[in-house]
Image (spheres, rainbow, N blue to C red):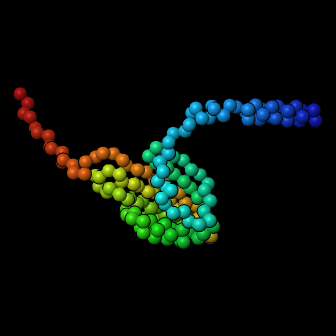
Amino acid sequence: MRATGIPALLTALLTLGTTACKAKPEAAVAHPGPPRARILYTIPVLPRSVVTDTAGADEAERRTWMVETPFDSVTGFYRRELRGLGWTLVSDEGDSSKVDLYLQKGGLGLERNRLSLWGHFQRVGPTATEYTLIASADTTTTPARAVPPQPLQAHPRS
């Protein structure tokens, strides 16, 4: 690129950046994002964890953290803390480098207001762990006592 092309390129980039920054703030307010579930705020976060990703919708949310803590200490912390908070461990699978936990809390079975929590824990190094928690709320109004389905009756052909 010639020396005269660099100033022109910088001018174009600065103009584009200035124009983008002058967008009306009302535009952002007029179209707020979808509401997010607020379930993970009840889950303890391991000290020194740094959020690396987050996403959510109205009935579920996900967060990923990185922490300079050994893998076994992180998984042990969450197994212990979540049980102490009333979560029921449904599934605990993994090996020496990754673990997947599935827990439920609240209305188990057909009752409403059940919370579900999935945890994925990955060894990143000898002293670092990445972990993701995904929480969802089932707020359906399914009755606590369901009527079993009736078998279909066979009708003879005419």
Query: Can residue 156 be seen from the camera position used here?
Result: yes
Residue drawn at 32 percent across, 50 percent down: 112
Residue drawn at 49 percent across, 55 percent down: 40
Quick one: quadrant of the N terminus? top right
Res. 68 image quadrant: bottom right
Residue 13: where, in percent of width, then height?
Answer: 80, 34
Res. 4 image quadrant: top right
Camera-nearest residue between 98 and 142 = 142
Q: In the rendered view, tell whether residue 152 sits above or below residue 86.
A: above
Residue 111: where, in percent of width, then height?
Answer: 29, 52
Q: In the rendered view, tell whether residue 57 sits above or below residue 125.
A: above
Q: From the viewer's perspective, is 141 left or right of 101?
A: left
Query: Can residue 123 be seen from the camera position used here?
Result: no
Residue ranking furthest to the top: 158
Q: In the rendered view, tell whether residue 149 sits above or below residue 32.
A: below
Residue 94: where, in percent of width, then height?
Answer: 47, 65
Q: From the viewer's perspective, is 96 left or right of 13?
A: left
Residue 23: where, in percent of width, then height?
Answer: 70, 31
Residue drawn at 6 percent across, 27 percent down: 158
Residue ranking furthest to the right: 3
Camera-nearest residue between 55 and 28 = 28
**Number of numbered discs visible in the structure rendering:** 0
Res. 70 image quadrant: bottom right
